[in-house]
Amino acid sequence: MNENYDSLRLKNQLCFPLYAVSNLVLRKYKPLLDKLDLTYTQYLVMMVLWEKEQASEKVLCESLDLQSNTLTPLIKKLADKGYIEKSKDPTDGRALAIRLTPLGKALQDKALCVPECMAKEFRITPEEANTLYRILYKILETEKERES
Amino acid sequence: MNENYDSLRLKNQLCFPLYAVSNLVLRKYKPLLDKLDLTYTQYLVMMVLWEKEQASEKVLCESLDLQSNTLTPLIKKLADKGYIEKSKDPTDGRALAIRLTPLGKALQDKALCVPECMAKEFRITPEEANTLYRILYKILETEKERES
DNA sequence: ATAAATTATATCGCACGCGATATAATTTGT
DNA sequence: ACAAATTATATCGCGTGCGATATAATTTAT
């Protein structure tokens, strides 16, 4: 191992702490979300629906930067749990109209403690949190521009 | 949806851009790593071994913040590909001694282009990259202190 | 009008991550 | 010395993510 390979040292990767922190955050959420019978990704879907009340699968895919091969089975699981219901969009026979059930709507109240609890889990300053947020969204938005 | 639920809006989560960027980065690495017959996590393991030449599974777990249920099968796959070899540590019968094969060592040269290519993928400034790196490692290290 | 292209959703297979648990080897406590 | 506790690795089951591909409905092009 000489300095020619410095670029391959774990400590010189930006991707690794990103990956490790992402895993860490998912582990932290898990016990909280277990109480709501939600996985992390299911929680994200529910967040979109708590805001929008109604959405197609396509809208969920775009909102969460995921694809149908991830969301199709996940939506089925949320429907099986009774949190959402699927129907056909009458204006476009290809599209799903995904809506919250009363049970799914009620879950929002139980979820209010989740952001509260998570805020206590990470000891970074509000400035650091803001900076992190801003840089991460810059990466996401740069990518969206590139795709179009 | 009223302001009482603002904390549950997707845009107010820090976890979501973290998760989305992490997924994005993995997607970006994939075509590059396919050429080396490595997955992303396998690449991380190889990076540790390129630096250390020899490591136990425990060392790999600690280095990558992963557990044996993830790494045991992954190590087996790397061994099946001929990149590493497993033997018993003679000083501790429980531990594995994991070492690079010549093929695994040679792979490092083919991997040199990976950080190069990835650097071009993300249009953030060096300052932003540094800031991101520093905050992410702060989160990881705060967590390690808390565990101990 | 209708064939071709596009779009929205669905299916399949593979490789993780991780909670839970099991097994084998070593260390600790008395 | 030896039973109990700890440690290192392994196994199992589940839920993603995603590349590849399929299917059905809509839009586009001529």
Image (tube, coloured by chain):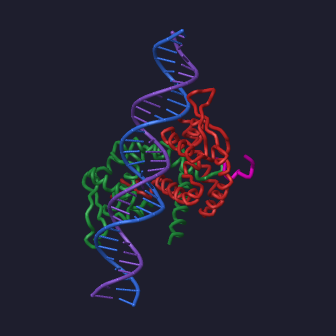
Chain colours: A red, B green, C blue, D purple
* Residue D15 at x, y percent in the picture: 49, 50
- Taking the spot 54% from the left edge, 69% from the top edge, the residue there is B146
Residue B59 percent coordinates (x, y): 38, 65
Q: Between B18 and B126, which is closer to the camera in this rendering?
A: B18
Horizontal side, residue C17 vs residue B2: left or right: left
Q: Specify whether A126 is left or right of B146.
A: right
Answer above or below: position of B20 versus A26. Answer: above
| Front residue of this view, candidates B30 and B105 | B30
Residue B138 picture quarter: bottom right
Was residue B44 drawn as part of the magenta stretch in this picture?
A: no
C10 relative to B101 in the view: left or right: right
Magenta stretch: helix, strand or loop mostly: helix
Give the x, y percent position of residue A81. 57, 48
Q: Is residue C30 left or right of residue A55?
A: left
- Residue at position x 63%, y 60% in the image: A119
Between residues A147 and C16, which one lies in front from this camera angle? C16
Q: Which residues are magenta?
A: B1-10
Give the residue at x 31% y 52%: B77
Residue B104 spot, x, y in % from top left: 29, 53
Residue at 64% from the left image edge and 43% from the top image edge? A100
Q: How many marks?
A: 0
